[in-house]
Image: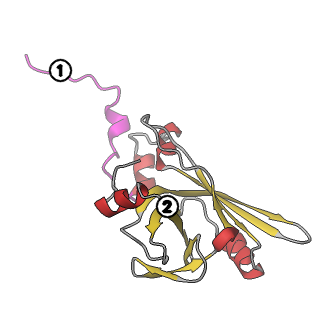
Amino acid sequence: MTRGLTGDALAALTAAEVRIALFFEGQFPGGAVRLWTGLGPMLWNGETWAGAGTLIGVSEIEDGARVEAAGLSVTLSGVPADLVQTVIAEAQQGLPGRVWIAFLTPEGEIIADPVLAFAGRLDVPEIRDAADSCLITVSYESRLIDLNRPREWRYTQESQAVSFPGDRGFEYVTAIQAQDIVWGR
């Protein structure tokens, strides 16, 4: 995946020791949740990202030559009760989520602009609550999944009224469907 990499990022990738961090941003009605795989807060892109350390896990990010819909799962373990309540109350299908890959210096500073590795929409959250731990897995799907969904829109007044209430642009479509029109002489 070399597209979008800056010269500094390519140099960091080919170095003897590569330090990688993942940044995750998930939108919820109450605001964005921003986490990264390091420890402590990190300032990037004008936002403060909370360090989740080993508590955050991201599934394999698929990027191939074929155009296909690939999903992603973000897993949090050892989650506090308030975050569980946020997921239960505010998780809505279709909200955006993104994951970036960043390269770090040995001191933990970002070398170059992180590369957007995945952007998709929230599918379903799964909460597994045990006596000693809580595990939240939030699944995201690519927007390409919409290509597999049938479109149920028709050129009728009823379909038009769903998207544009009060618009009468298709009012006479049914009247002219069976009408024979003589064109020319």
Residue drawn at 59 percent across, 49 percent down: 60
Is residue 73 among what the camera can see? yes
Is residue 163 one of those drawn in magenta?
no
Please tell me which residue lies in front, 54 or 131.
54
Extent of the magenta region: 164-185
Residue under numbered circle 2: 17
Residue drawn at 52 percent across, 43 percent down: 145
For residue 182, the mark is 1
Q: Earlier in the sequence, mark 2 or mark 1?
A: 2
Please tell me which residue lies in front, 146 or 39.
39
Q: Nearer the viewer, mark 2 or mark 1?
A: 2
Q: What amino acid does circle 1 point to?
A: Val
Q: Seen from this angle, which residue lies furthest top?
A: 185
The image shows residue 96 at horizontal and vertical percentages of 50, 63
Asked if the residues shown at circle 2 and circle 1 are in contact, with their CB atoms under 8 angstroms apart, the answer is no
Q: Seen from this angle, which residue lies furthest front?
A: 16
Quick one: SS at disc 2? loop
The image shows residue 24 at horizontal and vertical percentages of 54, 67
Residue drawn at 53 percent across, 63 percent down: 95
Q: With respect to residue 20, does 180 lie above or below?
A: above
Q: Is residue 55 left or right of residue 28?
A: right
Is residue 180 one of those drawn in magenta?
yes
Quick one: SS at disc 1? loop
Mark 1 is surrounded, within 10 Å at the Cα level, by few (under 14), some (14 to 19) or many (20 or more) other residues, namely: few
